[in-house]
Image (spheres, grey):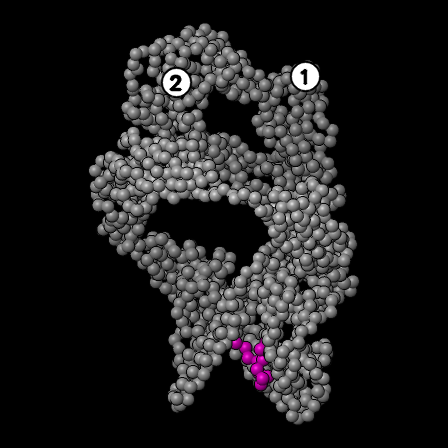
Amino acid sequence: MQLKIMPKKKRLSAGRVPLILFLCQMISALEVPLDPKLLEDLVQPPTITQQSPKDYIIDPRENIVIQCEAKGKPPPSFSWTRNGTHFDIDKDPLVTMKPGSGTLIINIMSEGKAETYEGVYQCTARNERGAAISNNIVIRPSRSPLWTKEKLEPMILRNGQPLVLPCRPPIGLPPPIIFWMDNSFQRLPQSERVSQGLNGDLYFSNVLPEDTREDYICYARFNHTQTIQQKQPISVKVISAKSSRERPPTFLTPEGNASNKEELRGNVLSLECIAEGLPTPIIYWIKEDGILPINRTFYRNFKKTLQIIHVSEADSGNYQCIAKNALGAIHHTISVTVKAAPYWIMAPQNLVLSPGEDGTLICRANGNPKPRISWLTNGVPVEIAPDDPSRKIDGDTIIFSNVQERSSAVYQCNASNEYGYLLANAFVNVLAEPPRILTSANTLYQVIANRPALLDCAFFGSPLPTIEWFKGAKGSALHEDIYVLHENGTLEIPVAQKDSTGTYTCVARNKLGMAKNDVHLEIKDPTRIIKQPEYAIVQRGSTVSFECKVKHDQTLVPTVMWLKDNGELPSDERFTVDKEQLVVADVSDDDGGTYTCVANTTLDSVSASAVLSVVAPTPTPAPIYDVPNPPFDLELTNQLDKSVQLSWTPGNDNNSPITKFIIEYEDTMHQAGLWHYQAEVSGTQTTAQLKLSPYVNYSFRVMAVNGIGRSLPSQASEQYLTKAAEPDTNPTAVEGLGSEPDNLVITWKPLNGFESNGPGLQYKVSWRQKDGDDEWTSVFVANVSKYIVSGTPTFVPYLIKVQALNDAGFAPEPAVVMGHSGEDLPMVAPGNVRVNVVNSTLAEVHWDPVPLKSIRGHLQGYRIYYWKAQNSSKRNRRHIEKKILTFQGSKTHGMLPGLEPFSHYTLNVRVVNGKGEGPASPDKVFNTPEGVPSAPSSLKIVNPTLDSLTLEWDPPSHPNGILTEYTLKYQPINSTHELGPLVDLKIPANKTRWTLKNLNVSTRYKFYFYAQTSAGSGSQITEEAVTTVDEVQAVNPRISNLTAAAAETYANLSWEYEGPEHVNFYVEYGVAGSKEEWKKEIVNGSRSFFGLKGLMPGTAYKVRVGAEGDSGFVSSEDVFETGPAMASRQVDIATQGWFIGLMCAVALLILILLIVCFIRRNKGGKYPVKEKEDAHADPEIQPMKEDDGTFGEYSDAEDHKPLKKGSRTPSDRTVKKEDSDDSLVDYGEGVNGQFNEDGSFIGQYSGKKEKEPAEGNESSEAPSPVNAMNSFV
């Protein structure tokens, strides 16, 4: 039995002994499952489950309810404080406490005032195990005061003047919602000219005569008390003037050129700029030295208000609002600072410990400013609480060691700063409980064959129990390969088979006792649709039927339902459903669509679909439907600097109405012949006003679109050249990287001709050191994409900006980016290199980091060079190969996998930056211990006699240590392929030949042979042989290597045959898992291949091959699965696997013949033996098992490929293992091999090197873990 620990999940391999699966959970604290039966008698400290909000605004017209609910065992008692002192509720007749709860009800509806009970309240829930406390709950009654009476004089203004109507609502709790309406309770219209500010005032950028009215009324709505207060109406009269004098913008709010704004993290940041001017200004927003967050930025109030939701510290900075009209522009800078009330990084969690165990409570919070952490125990500051020897406080952590039952308590963590506080309760509950199994006894699980089966065993105990699983009442032996045990005790059978049926026993043990539970598993056959509905084309008015024949497990009851277009069938008597078919009578056009048969059982569901097409002859020729004819007569009018009007005449719509027109343009100056999308308009329009860019030679064309498709383009319009202007944008992708240690290469993506906006495109390139006081250095360059600054210091940060300009002027001020001057090679090698040999194939390396200043560049990581010492014979014929592993970033340790056991290694470490490697550390030498050997290189049975067989073998190609002995196991096989008793024989390590005597006459034997070192047993090699009837016959005929290549409805079979010639073969096959008799097909002649036809798609089949005659024999069975049902398609023979294999075999045969001919012509020549030895491919890295101290973290994608049954065996009965190079090239390529911090491999090996042979075994990969957490509520 083997236990292999995977992340969050245990994978177990079952041998020939009773299955006992152990769950070893190494955790410091227990978690109590949510099981009511368990909680009934489990002692538990109090936990606050519900409480009123910290800031609790109440309605003074209703009773006050202050919530405080808690749970615990025994049930907790409750008490309250008010304003820091004990609140005796028995002395106040208006205050009562809800039975079984700590919730207070203050009856102020009959008598009393809400103001009397304003204050800060706190609830305490207490039992024998500790005390939990609530937040400080601040009780305040809501207020909705009346507006102060005031006399408002009428406002008289001239047309075009600015105006601000003040609201100034009364201060309420909470603050009211402000809106403006007239006497008819109609909201006043708002626009870019007229809008309401955040303070409630109504702003006019300029007034118009239609603004004259006497009922401008500001309303304040107090939601808490559901009341609305109104201000006295304001009268405004606008006097018309002959002409209003235009003026540039000025800000109505905020005042001045700059202001400050502070906001808390997580809130909504609202910034407002309202300007006056004539014409009405437009508002724009930018963030200096940054961009506005795309998904969190919103504009309100006609872009006068900028809002950023979920604001964080990164949103601090300077924001600029720009007001602009035709006469000018002004800007205002708002400096935003984001502070933060405390927020949790890690809130303390409840601890359930057993006596003598250790644990920790961690309370981590952040904020701006940094919050202060303080601890309380049972509501009392820990500094004045009773001392507990098992408790040690270290800042934000409480460490418990060797706890006892008296250590049980409730701890409170308080994190506070000037903007608020956080309070969290977490209890420590010390329990000593024997194991309990919470899963119901004798639970029956039913699972469909070949699907996963999950058998539950929920458990609890303190200390944490270990879990064991057995199958059968007496722990009967299991022969399945893999089981998976989850941390919550659940046993998973990844692929359940029929023989998985049975009773499984779960046993939980700890030092206080034991508990067990039986569950039962039944495996059911899958439901299949063996006769599927077929595609049908019928004429209108006829009848059509669809068949759906279902095969299912006899113990399950299926239900069959029909769907049309994934919905229910129409409620129409023309649709009739029988047992296995759907009939539709008097078919109409609406009946066309997809019909689906769905077969459901309680365990699975399958479906199959078919399409019904309804056709009918048309009595008259159908009208011709086609795409529209292209538009014509394109004309340009109203030609302005940045706009033009395009008109056209539509072409014929060809019996399908035109839905829209698509307009495209060509820039004949910059991109002649390339058409771009410009705009699209509805199909009823024949003109469009088009916006244009500067310095573009435009030509337009139009396409019409209807329900059929898009027309051909129209003829191009006349050309129109717009005037030049300064660039609108600057180059993008600006970077600064050095190519040499003393330079800075500034690159950017230049503007294209369309973006240049005019002739004479240039760039102003500016730079300065980031950490210095130097002024900007600037140069003007032509239309290029690179500039090199020479004479810079090595690897220094620089600020860079690139601005576009042309003959018309400069683009807007560009953004500043940061770059670095060139890197140089690191100067210092890593020090203090240590090696820890984990096992025979894995080592862990540690080193000290180098000083950052010595890196002289971007730290890429650390690179380990390591190599194996060669013996003298190998050193003569090849150089020492060095392997390289790179660990990214600042990691100071890494794992070396794939080492050869029993070997001598040397390594050194180097730091790597963008320029290259630094000097190597001093060489470090280490040795790997012995490992298990590879399989013997060959096994051959010679000299068969009546009662003896002689075995000859070659030692393992990779002994991986000193061989101690060989193990030979063998057993007889009868004519029905049943195995007899197994004989175990030990053979000295210095032997390569062994004779077995006194065997049965004319009997086939199967041999299992493997070598051993002190580390354990290696991989085995198998062979079969027969004792002869006389001295001539060597082996009986046999069929081996049966393989199947399956498609949808057929399969190609092939096999290998050894024995007399002129044998007639036959093929037997049937549905896998079915009890039906085998179907038999005769093979024409003595061929070793055959094609099965007429198979059902998506079905698993079993197959075997036999020989006709008295000495009949059959091969072992093979299982294959046909492909899923698909629409009929033509098969390209060139893509078929059997055809490709056949062609490869022919090519290989021709190549061998050519080589033989060449050798015969060149007898006496030298042969490149070394090249032949080096031609072997890499093996896959063997997964390492826990019992031999190795790991199973390294796997390959090839692990999941299915294995072929059988193996090709030469006629001389010799089996050879394939040699392969000992290389980890399978991990990847280059020097970018990387490891995670835990040593798991994420990178790749590299380096050109000579390879040495090594044994490889297939590996397997663990499935994803199932997170199974038990929580205490």
Residue 1182 image position (x, y, % from top left):
55, 68
Region of the chain picked out in magenta, as a range: 1207-1220
Left or right placement of residue 649 versus residue 399 in this view? left
- Residue 220 in magenta? no
Q: Residues within 10 Å of mark 1 (few under 14, many from 20)?
A: some
Q: CA distance from mark 1 to mark 2?
A: 47 Å
Q: Which mark is residue 204?
A: 2
From this view, report whether residue 1166 is shown above or below residue 301.
below
Looking at the rendered structure, the secondary structure element under dot 1 is loop
Left or right placement of residue 942 versus residue 904 in this view? right
Residue at left offset 65%, top offset 81%: 1064
Amino acid type shown at disc 2: Phe
Residue at left offset 66%, top offset 24%: 65
Q: Identify which residue, 702 or 912, lies in the foreground.
A: 702
Asked whether disc 1 touches disc 2, contact meaning CB atoms under 8 Å apart, the reply is: no
Determine if residue 580 is in view.
yes
Residue at left offset 52%, top offset 15%: 185
Q: Which residue corresponds to mark 1? A: 109
Determine if residue 2 is in view.
no
Q: Residues within 10 Å of mark 2 (few under 14, many from 20)?
A: many
Residue 1208 image position (x, y, % from top left):
58, 77
Residue at left offset 55%, top offset 35%: 422
Looking at the rendered structure, the secondary structure element under dot 2 is strand
Amino acid type shown at disc 1: Met
- Residue 1210 in magenta? yes
Q: Identify which residue, 457 or 837, lies in the foreground.
A: 457
Q: Nearer the viewer, mark 1 or mark 2?
A: 2
In the figure, residue 1188 lies in which quadrant?
bottom right
Considering the whole magenta stretch, tell me its main secondary structure. Answer: loop
Left or right placement of residue 707 versus residue 115 in this view? left
